[in-house]
Each structure stands twice: as structure tokens, then as C-alpha cells.
Amino acid sequence: MNQLHPLQRRVLRFIHQEQLLVSPAAVLVAVSGGPDSVALLHLLASLRERCGIRQLTVLHFNHQLRGTASAEDQAFVASLAATLGLPLETATADVRAHHRQHHVSLEMAARACRHRFFQDALVRLAADIVTEDPGCRR
């Protein structure tokens, strides 16, 4: 196998030390389109075999909060998933309506809608884990 980059080695070591994945694992990776989640996707895709990932699926939730930029993020993530040959699951919700209806901040409404999608995908796809970088809220 190819020589690993030092970052790949650190991530692989961390995954094993913390027992984050039980092989073979079906992993859902949340990708906003920002640099952190894109890097996470690339790392997981490059470490699939070594981590025992049997299925890697990209999740993208479009919050529809940034106009055309939100649609551009979704198109970018779709293109990235296709380039990597990975399945993609997308969803959207009326985050502003959730915000008004539940009297929570817009950020909390976005998080609730996004996490509902993640949990639904976890069950529907019979996956083992959803990964999300801390900044995945575009």
C-alpha cells in the first residue's frame, strides 16, 4: 500500500485509539462544502480500507439560509461525491419556519433540522455512525 501522509497516520491512529469505528463500518460523513468537512471527507475516503469502512456515504443538508450560496454548496458537494465515486444523500428544510415555530435561535433551528436529517439517514441507510465536523453548519 502507498505510504501514508503524516496527517493520515495521525487520523488513523486516533480512530484506532479511540475505537471510533468497528469494522466493517457504514459511515455517513456530513459535508457542508466548507474546507473542514471537505478535508474530513477526503481523509475518510483515503483511509477507507485501513479503517474498515465498507460503505462511505456523503450527507449534505441545505439550510437555505444563504441564497444562491447554499445552492452552490450543494452543487459542489454533489460534484465532489461523484468525483470520489461515493453515494450522496441530500435534504433541505425550512429552517426559518422551524426557528419561528419553536422560538429558538436560527442556529439552533438549523442544528435541529440538520440533525433530524442525519438521524433519519442513519436509520434508513442502516449506518453505524455519522461524522460531522464542528463547523458543518452552512
Image (spheres, grey):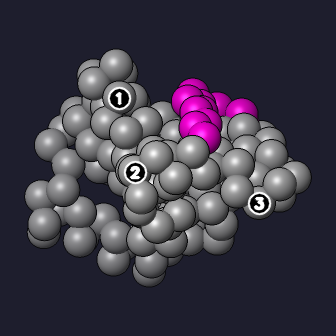
**Label located before the other in sequence (2 or 1):** 2
Query: Is residue 83 rendered magenta in the image?
Result: yes
From the image, state whether disc 3 or disc 1 is nearer to you. 3
Rendered location of residue 46, percent (x, y): 50, 53
From this viewpoint, is residue 63 visible? yes
User: What is the secondary structure assignment of the residue under circle 2?
Assistant: helix
The answer to whether marks 2 and 1 mark residues whose Cβ atoms lie closer than 8 Å is no
| Magenta region | 82-94
Three-letter code, disc 1: Asp
**Residue at (83%, 54%) from the top-left corner?**
67
From the image, state whether disc 2 or disc 3 is nearer to you. 2
Within-10-Å neighbours for mark 3: few <14, some 14–19, many 20+ = few
For the C terminus, the quadrant is bottom right
- Per the image, the residue denoted by label 1 is 120
The CA distance from mark 2 to mark 1 is 20 Å
Three-letter code, disc 3: Arg
Three-letter code, disc 2: His
Q: Quadrant of residue 132?
A: bottom left
Query: Is residue 97 rendered magenta in the image?
Result: no
**Residue at (39%, 29%) from the top-left corner?**
121
* Left or right: 50 as drawn, with respect to 84: left
User: What is the secondary structure assignment of the residue under circle 1?
Assistant: helix
**Label located before the other in sequence (2 or 3):** 3
- Per the image, the residue denoted by label 2 is 102
**Residue at (53%, 63%) from the top-left corner?**
106
Rendered location of residue 94, percent (x, y): 60, 41
The CA distance from mark 2 to mark 3 is 21 Å
- Per the image, the residue denoted by label 3 is 66
